[in-house]
Image (cartoon, coloured by chain):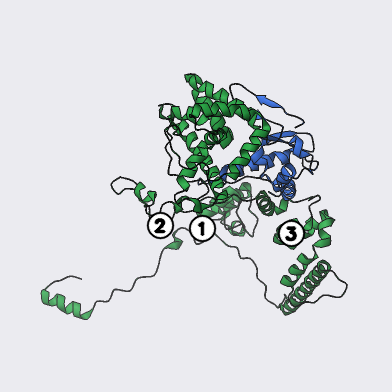
Amino acid sequence: MDNATKAAKINKYMKQLKNEDMRYRALEKLGQIEMSVQLLADTKVGKAVNKWACDDSVGEMASDIIEKWKVLARRAGYEESSKRTRSESPDSPPPVKRSKLRESDSQKRDESPTKKTKKESKKVAIAPSNDFDAMLAQADKIQARPKANKFHLTAADLDTNYRPLSLSKPKERPTSSHEDNHIHEDILKYRMTDRQRVFAGRKKATGMTKVETLFTLCLRTVGNNINLIEDTGDIPFYILRPVLEKCTPEQLAYIESKNPILEEDGDCLWEQHFKMKFPSETTNEEESWKYAYFRTDRQKKGDEKNKLAKLREKIGGQVVVAGSGRQAIMADATAPRHIKRRQMNNGSAFSAKPIPSALEVRKARREIFDTGNTSNLRSMSSMVNNLGGSGGGGHRTKKEPPKKKAPLMVKTLKMLNWKRK
Amino acid sequence: MSNNKDEIDEETQEITVEGPESTYVKLVSSDGHEFYIKREHALISGTIKAMLSGPGAFQENEANEVNFREIPSHVLLKVCHYFAYKAKYTNSAAEIPEFNIEPDVALELLMAANFLDC
């Protein structure tokens, strides 16, 4: 956007400012335009915006914009004053700032030899400004006459629209270098009278403090998902190196098998793996580290196998051979009867002898009844026969020896006439 | 100023798309996807910055358009997201959230990031 279009736009917005509905938007747009001091002076937009600085609805925005333009003007003013020497006047800074804005006026004034009023001088100035050469000449004049516009402040010179200079400085300087006399305003922010939360210590940096580069972020993501790496395409080794250094030998071998490009340059990584795992080994000549790694690995594995086999043999030889005479056999382990019954019902009963069928049992029992011959039933499993040693088998039959009384106790009882056993 | 397309909407913002010092620039992926992003965002990438503001050696200077013949659209999209993310959270006191990258695009994005120097 060149100056002419900008100026046209500014004029358009200035007109819109008069319309209440469009005022806010117009201000917004004015704020967004890249302003220059030249434009400010030409269009007098500063005046127009300042008019609304006290308004209820748009005042804040208007003042913000004015501030911004003032900073701009001041900065330009500084640049101007740097061209001139400072020794010219003792209190040059403030007047120079002010004078920059009015310079456009004074320029035009300088044109006319006699002192005219502002309006008249303006009229004179408009004509030559159309002519490019004259403009150039004007520009030269500024340079040539540094002392020209000083403080010949007559009534005519004063700008009727008073714009107070704010004490804020250009944006470049940090706020801490603000006037040293003043206490830092943050101290005044938190008054002890206000019921607010008080924090001790430093605020913890829970999130990140700086935005990282996309490159770093990607590298980290890849590093966290090494198992998913298959085909790396054209990525050169040096870029992927941090990721590959994180890999285990197996992962590295897999990735290299998929991407031969990385294999060529990746031997140094294998060197590290080799030295880590087999610190005392050496390599043969003409052998890449990778090859050496796998060779040594295989050897070690082979060695281990051999060792294991030897051990097995040793242990095997010392085992006592079976058949020394003793032989363990299963006894007919009998469970209590109720458990036996349960087992039978469940089907998990075990007996050395086969469990007879009900018919057989009945027959055998009948036999006893008939003939008194218990041999058949006895031969059957002890689960079935109820002949021997059951019923009261659990009772104690021995007679308890009589309890012995303590002799002293007996004596005491006698004394007390306490006839008790 | 070969293409001076000024898209002026009376009611809303003025967007200059082409022309020197336009607000927006155009990034084109290898598969023809065109991304219009703010100039200041694009300048986050050192490579793009050099291309757009170089001493006239690059044709992109005039047209404010950069063609990436090696970057596919799904990668360039992520790159544009990163520009927005960085522009928003640089010099901001707010807590910076994590920038998520899917593992699928990570490798290609890595290459692109290396090329674009960002």
Q: Residue A241 is drawn in which quadrant?
A: bottom right
The amino acid at mark 1 is: Pro
The amino acid at mark 2 is: Gly
The image shows residue A394, relative to residue B86, as above or below, that is below
User: Dot 3 corresponds to which residue?
Assistant: A241
The residues tagged by marks 2 and 3 sit, at their Cα atoms, a distance apart of 41 Å
Give the quadrant of the N terminus of chain B: top right
User: Dot 2 corresponds to which residue?
Assistant: A201
Q: Which residue occupies the foreground of this view, B105 or A335?
A: B105
Chain designation of label 1: A
Question: Does residue A197 appear in the picture of this structure?
Answer: no
The image shows residue B52, relative to residue A305, as above or below, that is above
Which comes before the other along the chain, label 1 or label 2?
Answer: 2
User: Dot 1 corresponds to which residue?
Assistant: A336
Which chain is rendered blue in the image?
A: B
Q: Nearer the viewer, mark 1 or mark 3?
A: 3
